[in-house]
Image (cartoon, rainbow, N blue to C red):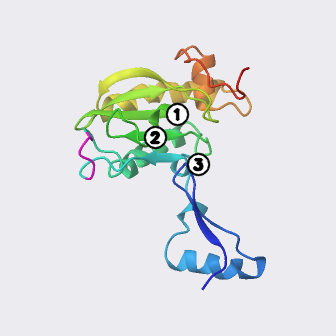
Amino acid sequence: MHEGDFRMTPNQNLVIAGVPEAKRAQIDALVAAHGLDGFRSASPLRLKSLACVALPTCGLAMAEAERYLPALLDKLEAQLATHGLTDADIGLRISGCPNGCSRPYLGEIALVGKAPGRYNLMLGADHRGQRLNTLYRENIAEPEILAALEPLLADYAAERGAGEGFGDFLVRAGVVTPRIGIPVELQA
């Protein structure tokens, strides 16, 4: 029996919290023994990615999301590596339909399912979740998605500012026009 509790975050992470210092090594060993320590070696892109369940679980889904995410991540990580961006902390989200259960409208890169194998490519949200992304390409398949992202990632690698997120770069470079931001504080 362990002391502490399990917490789910809005980004679909599981936190084992409230574990006394003396018990942490035991919990870490259990996590590793059950193969749940992938977070230790995963790329920032993989760590920041979200997908809804989509097909075949959700009756509203029009495209894959959860089952497609690992294959897409492999291809995007290869693109990032080509441009020396393996450590880039980019938020990726995929939803099987416009209902957006994975909150794709907050992804710096997001795919919103339109039909089997076809997605709207949304770009330009900010890293903190205070700016929604914008439609960049409509109803495209994986080859067009990867082709659309390739020059943007190249430009990001060459021209990004210190600590500048991908979504912020896309807005600054004029690739996308930002939507009205979400205020940090309520206005009176």
Q: Residue at the location (59% across, 19% down)? A: 171
Q: Is 160 drawn above or below residue 17 in the view shown?
A: above
Mark closer to the chain start, 2 or 1: 2
Q: Residue at the location (55% across, 49% down)? A: 10
Left or right? Give the position of 167 relative to 56.
right
Comparing marks 2 and 1, which lies closer to the viewer? 1
- Name the foreground residue: 19 vs 81: 19
Label 3 is placed on what type of residue? Pro
CA–CA distance between discs 2 and 3? Answer: 13 Å
Examine the residues drawn in magenta and state their main secondary structure: loop
| Residue 125: quarter of image | top right
Q: Tell me if label 2 and label 1 are in contact, CB under 8 Å.
A: yes
Label 2 is placed on what type of residue? Arg
Q: In the rendered structure, does residue 91 fall within the stretch colored magenta? A: no
Mark closer to the chain start, 2 or 3: 3
> Crowding near pointer 1: few (<14 within 10 Å), some, many (20+)?
many
Element type where label 2 sits in the image: strand
Q: Percent position (x, y) of residue 113?
A: 31, 35
- Name the foreground residue: 114 vs 146: 114
Left or right? Give the position of 126 relative to 121.
right
Element type where label 3 sits in the image: helix
The residue indicated by pointer 1 is 106
Q: Which residues are magenta?
A: 57-61
Q: Residue at the location (57% across, 22% down)? A: 170
Name the image quarter holding the C terminus.
top right
Q: In the rendered structure, does residue 59 fall within the stretch colored magenta? A: yes
Q: Residue at the location (36% across, 50% down)? A: 66
> Crowding near pointer 2: few (<14 within 10 Å), some, many (20+)?
many
Q: Percent position (x, y) of residue 180?
A: 58, 17
The residue indicated by pointer 3 is 44
| Residue 42: quarter of image | bottom right
